[in-house]
Protein backbone atom coordinates (compact mmCIF):
# COMPACT_ATOMS: atom_id res chain seq x y z
CA UNK A 1 0.00 0.00 0.00
CA UNK A 2 2.80 2.47 0.72
CA UNK A 3 4.54 1.61 -2.52
CA UNK A 4 1.31 2.20 -4.51
CA UNK A 5 0.62 5.52 -2.75
CA UNK A 6 4.20 6.66 -3.39
CA UNK A 7 3.86 5.82 -7.05
CA UNK A 8 0.59 7.74 -7.25
CA UNK A 9 2.13 10.84 -5.68
CA UNK A 10 5.11 10.68 -8.03
CA UNK A 11 3.01 9.91 -11.13
CA UNK A 12 0.56 12.81 -10.84
CA UNK A 13 3.20 15.60 -10.74
CA UNK A 14 4.98 14.02 -13.69
CA UNK A 15 1.74 13.96 -15.72
CA UNK A 16 1.00 17.60 -14.94
CA UNK A 17 4.52 18.58 -15.86
CA UNK A 18 4.14 16.87 -19.23
CA UNK A 19 0.93 18.80 -19.94
CA UNK A 20 2.54 22.13 -19.03
CA UNK A 21 5.52 21.40 -21.22
CA UNK A 22 3.21 20.55 -24.12
CA UNK A 23 1.39 23.89 -23.87
CA UNK A 24 4.56 25.90 -23.35
CA UNK A 25 6.06 24.28 -26.43
CA UNK A 26 3.22 25.73 -28.58
CA UNK A 27 3.62 29.25 -27.22
CA UNK A 28 5.00 31.74 -29.73
CA UNK A 29 3.93 29.78 -32.85
CA UNK A 30 0.72 29.96 -34.92
CA UNK A 31 -0.85 27.78 -37.53
CA UNK A 32 -0.71 28.89 -41.17
CA UNK A 33 -3.34 31.54 -42.03
CA UNK A 34 -5.56 29.37 -44.21
CA UNK A 35 -8.20 32.08 -44.63
CA UNK A 36 -5.77 34.65 -46.11
CA UNK A 37 -7.01 37.38 -43.77
CA UNK A 38 -3.57 38.18 -42.39
CA UNK A 39 -2.12 38.51 -45.89
CA UNK A 40 -4.99 40.75 -47.00
CA UNK A 41 -4.64 43.06 -43.99
CA UNK A 42 -0.91 43.31 -44.57
CA UNK A 43 -1.46 44.31 -48.20
CA UNK A 44 -4.45 46.60 -47.47
CA UNK A 45 -3.78 48.50 -44.26
CA UNK A 46 -6.59 50.58 -42.80
CA UNK A 47 -6.63 54.23 -43.80
CA UNK A 48 -8.84 57.06 -42.58
CA UNK A 49 -8.46 58.97 -45.86
CA UNK A 50 -11.83 59.35 -47.60
CA UNK A 51 -12.26 57.80 -51.03
CA UNK A 52 -13.81 59.61 -53.99
CA UNK A 53 -17.35 58.63 -54.95
CA UNK A 54 -17.51 57.29 -58.52
CA UNK A 55 -19.11 59.72 -60.94
CA UNK A 56 -22.42 58.90 -62.60
CA UNK A 57 -22.21 57.04 -65.88
CA UNK A 58 -23.15 58.96 -69.02
CA UNK A 59 -24.11 57.22 -72.26
CA UNK A 60 -23.57 58.84 -75.69
CA UNK A 61 -24.41 57.85 -79.25
CA UNK A 62 -22.44 58.66 -82.40
CA UNK A 63 -23.36 60.09 -84.81
CA UNK A 64 -25.99 62.20 -83.07
CA UNK A 65 -27.83 62.78 -86.38
CA UNK A 66 -28.22 60.86 -89.63
CA UNK A 67 -29.92 61.15 -93.01
CA UNK A 68 -31.79 58.33 -94.75
CA UNK A 69 -33.32 59.17 -98.14
CA UNK A 70 -33.47 55.71 -99.73
CA UNK A 71 -35.45 52.62 -98.72
CA UNK A 72 -32.97 49.97 -97.63
CA UNK A 73 -30.28 52.53 -96.77
CA UNK A 74 -28.25 51.64 -93.67
CA UNK A 75 -26.56 53.80 -91.03
CA UNK A 76 -24.10 52.60 -88.39
CA UNK A 77 -24.34 53.92 -84.82
CA UNK A 78 -21.89 53.43 -81.95
CA UNK A 79 -22.59 53.73 -78.22
CA UNK A 80 -19.94 54.96 -75.77
CA UNK A 81 -19.85 54.98 -71.99
CA UNK A 82 -22.79 53.45 -70.21
CA UNK A 83 -22.91 50.49 -67.87
CA UNK A 84 -23.23 46.89 -69.03
CA UNK A 85 -24.82 45.58 -72.22
CA UNK A 86 -26.64 47.87 -74.65
CA UNK A 87 -30.25 47.51 -75.81
CA UNK A 88 -31.31 49.19 -79.06
CA UNK A 89 -34.65 50.45 -80.36
CA UNK A 90 -36.34 52.98 -82.66
CA UNK A 91 -39.13 55.44 -81.97
CA UNK A 92 -41.01 54.51 -85.17
CA UNK A 93 -40.67 50.87 -86.27
CA UNK A 94 -42.73 51.62 -89.40
CA UNK A 95 -39.96 53.84 -90.79
CA UNK A 96 -36.94 51.76 -89.85
CA UNK A 97 -35.38 49.02 -87.76
CA UNK A 98 -32.20 48.69 -85.71
CA UNK A 99 -30.03 45.57 -85.40
CA UNK A 100 -27.25 45.14 -82.83
CA UNK A 101 -23.82 44.39 -84.30
CA UNK A 102 -21.14 43.59 -81.76
CA UNK A 103 -20.85 44.91 -78.23
CA UNK A 104 -21.35 48.63 -78.88
CA UNK A 105 -22.59 49.08 -82.47
CA UNK A 106 -25.92 48.80 -84.29
CA UNK A 107 -27.12 49.22 -87.88
CA UNK A 108 -30.23 51.21 -88.77
CA UNK A 109 -32.12 50.16 -91.93
CA UNK A 110 -34.58 52.52 -93.60
CA UNK A 111 -37.96 50.86 -94.32
CA UNK A 112 -39.94 54.00 -95.18
CA UNK A 113 -38.31 57.38 -95.81
CA UNK A 114 -39.26 59.49 -92.81
CA UNK A 115 -38.21 60.81 -89.42
CA UNK A 116 -37.03 58.39 -86.78
CA UNK A 117 -34.97 58.17 -83.60
CA UNK A 118 -32.43 55.52 -82.68
CA UNK A 119 -32.45 54.90 -78.93
CA UNK A 120 -29.87 52.95 -76.94
CA UNK A 121 -30.20 52.01 -73.26
CA UNK A 122 -27.69 50.34 -70.93
CA UNK A 123 -28.26 47.93 -68.04
CA UNK A 124 -28.56 50.79 -65.52
CA UNK A 125 -31.22 52.70 -67.47
CA UNK A 126 -29.02 55.39 -69.04
CA UNK A 127 -30.21 56.57 -72.47
CA UNK A 128 -28.83 58.11 -75.64
CA UNK A 129 -30.73 59.20 -78.75
CA UNK A 130 -29.76 59.92 -82.36
CA UNK A 131 -32.19 61.51 -84.82
CA UNK A 132 -32.64 60.34 -88.41
CA UNK A 133 -34.17 62.71 -90.96
CA UNK A 134 -35.30 62.04 -94.53
CA UNK A 135 -33.60 65.10 -96.05
CA UNK A 136 -30.50 67.16 -95.38
CA UNK A 137 -30.68 70.02 -92.90
CA UNK A 138 -28.60 72.51 -94.89
CA UNK A 139 -31.65 74.73 -95.57
CA UNK A 140 -32.74 74.82 -91.92
CA UNK A 141 -30.64 75.12 -88.78
CA UNK A 142 -31.30 74.92 -85.06
CA UNK A 143 -29.41 76.97 -82.51
CA UNK A 144 -27.61 76.07 -80.36
CA UNK A 145 -26.57 72.81 -82.06
CA UNK A 146 -25.57 71.22 -78.76
CA UNK A 147 -26.18 71.89 -75.05
CA UNK A 148 -24.70 70.42 -71.88
CA UNK A 149 -26.80 70.39 -68.71
CA UNK A 150 -24.91 69.68 -65.49
CA UNK A 151 -24.86 70.58 -61.82
CA UNK A 152 -28.64 70.39 -61.52
CA UNK A 153 -29.42 72.55 -64.57
CA UNK A 154 -32.68 71.44 -66.18
CA UNK A 155 -33.58 74.01 -68.85
CA UNK A 156 -32.40 74.97 -72.32
CA UNK A 157 -33.93 77.03 -75.14
CA UNK A 158 -33.64 76.59 -78.91
CA UNK A 159 -34.52 78.53 -82.04
CA UNK A 160 -34.77 77.56 -85.69
CA UNK A 161 -33.89 79.52 -88.83
CA UNK A 162 -34.69 78.67 -92.43
CA UNK A 163 -37.36 76.24 -93.54
CA UNK A 164 -41.07 76.95 -93.81
CA UNK A 165 -43.26 77.62 -90.76
CA UNK A 166 -45.16 76.45 -88.86
CA UNK A 167 -42.68 74.29 -87.00
CA UNK A 168 -43.20 71.41 -84.59
CA UNK A 169 -40.70 70.27 -81.96
CA UNK A 170 -40.10 66.84 -80.43
CA UNK A 171 -37.87 65.23 -77.82
CA UNK A 172 -36.15 62.04 -78.92
CA UNK A 173 -36.49 60.48 -75.47
CA UNK A 174 -39.09 61.90 -73.05
CA UNK A 175 -37.51 59.82 -70.27
CA UNK A 176 -34.59 62.29 -70.38
CA UNK A 177 -36.53 65.47 -71.06
CA UNK A 178 -39.49 67.12 -72.80
CA UNK A 179 -39.85 70.06 -75.18
CA UNK A 180 -42.60 72.69 -75.26
CA UNK A 181 -43.39 75.56 -77.64
CA UNK A 182 -46.09 78.03 -78.56
CA UNK A 183 -47.99 77.39 -81.79
CA UNK A 184 -48.05 81.14 -82.55
CA UNK A 185 -44.25 81.43 -82.29
CA UNK A 186 -43.03 77.93 -82.99
CA UNK A 187 -39.59 79.08 -84.15
CA UNK A 188 -38.51 78.91 -80.48
CA UNK A 189 -38.85 76.06 -78.00
CA UNK A 190 -37.96 75.24 -74.40
CA UNK A 191 -36.43 71.98 -73.21
CA UNK A 192 -36.85 70.68 -69.64
CA UNK A 193 -34.65 67.82 -68.47
CA UNK A 194 -35.89 65.15 -66.07
CA UNK A 195 -34.10 65.61 -62.73
CA UNK A 196 -31.62 62.81 -62.06
CA UNK A 197 -31.79 61.45 -65.63
CA UNK A 198 -28.38 61.37 -67.33
CA UNK A 199 -27.49 60.65 -70.92
CA UNK A 200 -27.72 62.12 -74.40
CA UNK A 201 -30.95 63.33 -75.97
CA UNK A 202 -31.97 64.94 -79.26
CA UNK A 203 -34.38 67.82 -79.83
CA UNK A 204 -35.78 67.94 -83.37
CA UNK A 205 -37.70 70.63 -85.20
CA UNK A 206 -39.76 69.83 -88.33
CA UNK A 207 -41.05 72.47 -90.77
CA UNK A 208 -44.19 72.46 -92.92
CA UNK A 209 -42.36 70.67 -95.76
CA UNK A 210 -40.90 67.91 -93.62
CA UNK A 211 -37.40 69.34 -93.36
CA UNK A 212 -35.74 68.67 -90.02
CA UNK A 213 -32.96 70.00 -87.85
CA UNK A 214 -31.74 68.55 -84.57
CA UNK A 215 -29.73 69.57 -81.53
CA UNK A 216 -27.95 67.34 -79.05
CA UNK A 217 -28.43 67.63 -75.28
CA UNK A 218 -25.99 65.91 -72.92
CA UNK A 219 -27.14 65.60 -69.30
CA UNK A 220 -24.52 64.96 -66.63
CA UNK A 221 -24.49 65.18 -62.81
Image (spheres, grey):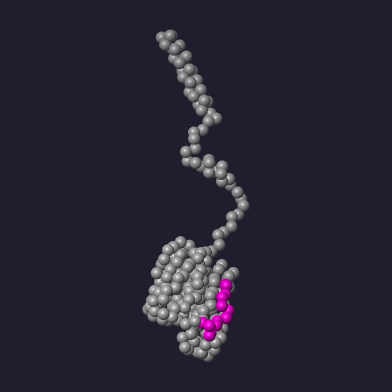
Judge whether 50 appears above or below 34 on screen.
below
- Front residue of 216/31: it is 216
Q: In this view, which residue lies farthest toward the right?
A: 49
Q: Quadrant of the N terminus?
A: top left
| The magenta segment | 137-149
Residue 6, image x, y percentages: 45, 11
Q: Can residue 141 be found in the magenta stretch?
A: yes
Q: Residue at x 52, y 87 (%)?
A: 163
- Front residue of 179/140: it is 140
Judge whether 19 appears above or below 30 on screen.
above
All told, the count of numbered labels is: 0
Location of residue 96 (image quadrant): bottom left
Q: Residue at x 48, y 17 (%)?
A: 14
Q: Can residue 202 be found in the magenta stretch?
A: no
Residue 174, image x, y percentages: 47, 76
Q: Residue at x 49, y 41 (%)?
A: 36
Residue 77, image x, y percentages: 46, 70
Give left or right: position of 56 versus 121. Answer: right
Judge whether 11 appears above or below 159 on screen.
above
Residue 111, image x, y percentages: 38, 78
Q: Residue at x 48, y 21 (%)?
A: 18
Q: Is residue 197 visible?
A: no
Q: Is residue 162 visible?
A: yes
Q: Quadrant of the C terminus?
A: bottom right
- Front residue of 179/203: it is 203
Majority secondary structure of magenta residues? strand
Amino acid sequence: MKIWRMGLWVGLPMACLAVLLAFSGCEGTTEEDSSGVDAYLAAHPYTSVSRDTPSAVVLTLSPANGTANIIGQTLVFKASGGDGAFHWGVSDSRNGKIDSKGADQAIYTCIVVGNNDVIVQDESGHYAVAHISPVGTDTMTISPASVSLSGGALYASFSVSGGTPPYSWTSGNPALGTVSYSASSSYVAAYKAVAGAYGQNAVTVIDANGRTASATITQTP
